[in-house]
Image (spheres, coloured by chain):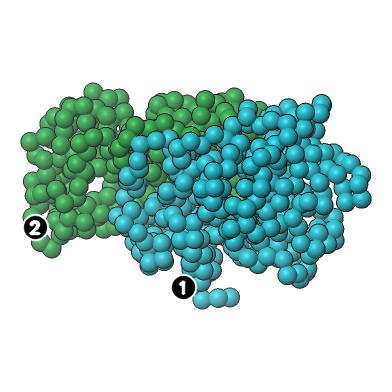
Chain colours: A green, B cyan
Amino acid sequence: MSDPNDQIVLAHGGGGELTQRLIAERFLPRLGNPLLDPLGDSALLELPPGRLAFTTDSHVVQPIEFPGGDIGRLAVCGTVNDLAVMGAVPRALSLAVILEEGLPLSLLDRVIDSIAAAASEAGVNIVTGDTKVVEHQRGDGLIITTAGVGELRGGVRLDLGRVAPGDAVIVTGRIAEHGLAVMCAREGLGLQTQLRSDVAPVNGLIDRLYAAGVDLKFMRDPTRGGLAGVLADLCQATRMTVCVEERAIPMTGIARHTAELLGLDPLLVANEGKVVVVVPPEDADRALAACREHPLGKHAAVVGHVLEAQPPLVELVTRSGGRRLVQRPYGEELPRIC
Amino acid sequence: MSDPNDQIVLAHGGGGELTQRLIAERFLPRLGNPLLDPLGDSALLELPPGRLAFTTDSHVVQPIEFPGGDIGRLAVCGTVNDLAVMGAVPRALSLAVILEEGLPLSLLDRVIDSIAAAASEAGVNIVTGDTKVVEHQRGDGLIITTAGVGELRGGVRLDLGRVAPGDAVIVTGRIAEHGLAVMCAREGLGLQTQLRSDVAPVNGLIDRLYAAGVDLKFMRDPTRGGLAGVLADLCQATRMTVCVEERAIPMTGIARHTAELLGLDPLLVANEGKVVVVVPPEDADRALAACREHPLGKHAAVVGHVLEAQPPLVELVTRSGGRRLVQRPYGEELPRIC
């Protein structure tokens, strides 16, 4: 039994003295900035005129800490990436935490440190927040919900209606690492591998693509549902076939073998630091070059193309030259992965 | 045991087919609007140039439904009100839900209906969202986190630095009803009263105050920590004494007696449809008149004044003419109230 003084207690969530101290002693020293520090009911931001992107995500990953990241890094990157794939420049995040009674304060401190580091990496501040506490066994250790606002770039032309036969489908790096790392770290699984989650903010990588003048028609981060989920969305929205080459999909041998061992299709496994991009064929090389200039894009590859073939399907050309259909996962291949 | 087809299952949270159906069949028909319907990674809003207010709140109230409201209405109003008390006009909300396996779909439907009704009452849309599912007994039935963006009005001069001796402290209605209604509804308490939560969006009421040209120096909604918490904040930030008259504080007899029965100080009990406002003495009558024009402000009253007296304290003149200090609650007077 650890020291009760080192744990979250219900009173931390009451909105009184103890809530104030939790925020003043643990959150502000790590996350403080001129917008957050006043602790008003809302933060007030100065944004230039233009369109605003707005998004939210709740995070319930288990375990809270895993190789390559933790729930805090995941929460920041998830929201930053949802803004970035819309062509927006992330400007500010909110942070709402639900703490379970008994949560060790040392774990909370590590997660807040990780939030601070990820936010700094993404170049964005936490500007407003909320803290709640639930009784032991009514919560889940630590649940984090982030929301984010971003400024839409001028000239963004992301539009599924512009996707055309011949367009190249690019994946910006090796797939399946987040989901597999979390699965392996999960208590009871007993699998030790060198797999680490890829969780990272992709806004810097996307900045490179825009700076290179690539005509981006579609972008999405393949999180829950994995690459297969994004390709299914693309196919469904465009009513065109998407044909991908298994051989071209960037993936480490460790990831492939771990997925095999777990009986999982790596195409269905969540990523948290990757982007699927659709560009016209003549822009594919420029897009790859732009990706490879960025540390997160070293292994970017064209994995397939959009085709006119009907009915619209997602088709995978396997390593052995066979063909199989790729389907959207039905339900919960991998529970509690983000 | 209810029909398993009428319950949330883990697969609803996997990001696959079943997640899509949950959103398409239950959320979109009730909350749909042109910004939400594309279900992009972020919503794109058109906002006029100016300052943006941004806020978030997680909601873990138990029970999920209570007299006068439910967690959905609470989540919408909490965020709308946090924007409104900053002088902002709420423009868009995000909605992130965490569903516990086994949650009856009929309950979820009622809560989404309630979210839709509250959002319509506040004149704001849900424009982006997220859904996660956690295992039975790892969640709390239903947890909702909302974030909101609002447009700061021109000419807002909310500034604790402008609060001066003689300023009037106004409460816009009867206090303590949310917290008491939730406590009475809580399983096991067995108290039946006519108390109903006051949970409501206060942005319309605040619109009236601005329209009447009242010089608002400070506004806050007295939620967790109650009226006492807001007065303690006011005293702490201004380093001035706040003197309130117990007799002037709007409260029903039922609320007073219920608080007595439960051994609670009604000043510490949460409200979810009230505002504490500080105005110069010459604006007090105009502010009261403006409040009373609105259904939520019928019982508005000047409850006290700001004084120069040192040391700075919150002082209550009791009904019997005695004086006592009002202190910020230390911890959890009333757990899980919002």
Please say if the residues under marks 2 and 1 sit with CB atoms less than 8 Å apart: no
The percent position of residue B173, horizontal first and vertical second, equals 68, 55
Residue drawn where x is 66% and y is 37% of the image: B280
Q: Residue at x 13, y 63 (%)?
A: A311
Chain under numbered label 2: A
Nearer to me, A19 or A316: A19
Q: Quadrant of residue B161?
A: top right
What mark, if any, has residue B183 been given in the picture?
none
| Up-down relation of residue B241 to residue A229 (above or below) | above
Q: Position of residue A51 (x, y in %)?
A: 31, 40
Looking at the figure, which quarter contains the C terminus of chain A?
A: top left
Numbered disc 1: what chain? Answer: B
- The count of marks equals 2
- Rendering quarter of residue B163: top right
Give the labeled residue for mark 1.
B5
Specify the amino acid type for callout 1. Answer: Asn
Viewed as shown, does residue B306 lie left or right of B101? right
Q: Residue at x 44, y 54 (%)?
A: B124
Q: Is residue B138 above or below residue B168?
A: below
**Quadrant holding the N terminus of chain A:** top right
What's the distance in space between the residues labelled 2 and 1, CA to CA? 37 Å
Q: Which residue is mark 2?
A: A309
Q: Nearer the viewer, residue B209 or A116?
A: B209
In the foreground, B317 or B225: B317
Question: What's under tag 2, amino acid-wise?
Answer: Ala
The residue shown at (66%, 40%) is B282
